[in-house]
Amino acid sequence: MERLIKIFLLFLIISFLVYSILDAFAIVGTSSAVIPAKEKKVEIGSLQQEFPVRIVIPDAGVDASIEQPVSVNISALDESLTRGAVHYPGSGYPGVGNMFLFGHSTNWKYVRNQAYKTFNNIQNLEKGDVVEVYTDNAKYLYRVLSVRLADDSEVLVDFDGGKDMLTISTCNTFGEKQERFVVEADFVRKVPIE
């Protein structure tokens, strides 16, 4: 099963990198169509959880919308990546489980689509830095536990760990698939938005 997940992640990474490079050079165009979430909330046991809609990481200069693809289909995930961060379907939700967000980053100074800079600078985060994830009604605060550069064959996100946390992943270099920056952060608290 672990090998199958690694193969799937590798396929996902390769496909969005190829599309991203083509889009960056305007060889293909991005669609403005939105992949809508069927609902703004989801039932988890007796709890009702909201989808994340925005991520802010002050110490990295990140402020991005979060897309909600309705499936793990590669084309749906690729399309979502052209608009910002992506909440991986089946991972946790704000404050519940391991929420997995991924997106592009680049060391290129100029790119046509700013979504390719979504997670620029997350490699500079340090233990204790704050990550804010917003829903329509609340802000969820997370504290960074670790930042590491991992080989793509090592990156495996555990959705069943029973821990309320956030995992963020992005490419080391735009167009490269061998390494990822992975940030893990513990859930701290929920703050209502007034």
Image (spheres, rainbow, N blue to C red):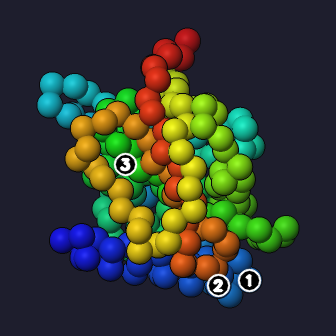
Nearer the observer, 32 or 183: 183
Residue placed under numbered mark 3 in the picture: 37
Give the residue drawn at x 55%, y 78%: 177
- Residue 41 visible? The answer is no
Residue 22: mark: 2
Report the quarter where the C terminus lies.
top right
Left or right: where 95 falls relative to 28: left
Closest to the camera, between mark 3 and mark 2, is 2
Which residue reaches farthest bottom? Answer: 27
- Vertical side of 28 occupied by 157: above or below: above
Give the residue drawn at x 48%, y 45%: 184
Amino acid found under the numbered disc labelled 2: Leu
Residue 25: mark: 1
Amino acid found under the numbered disc labelled 3: Ala
- Identify the image quadrant of residue 157: bottom left
Kind of element beneath mark 3: loop
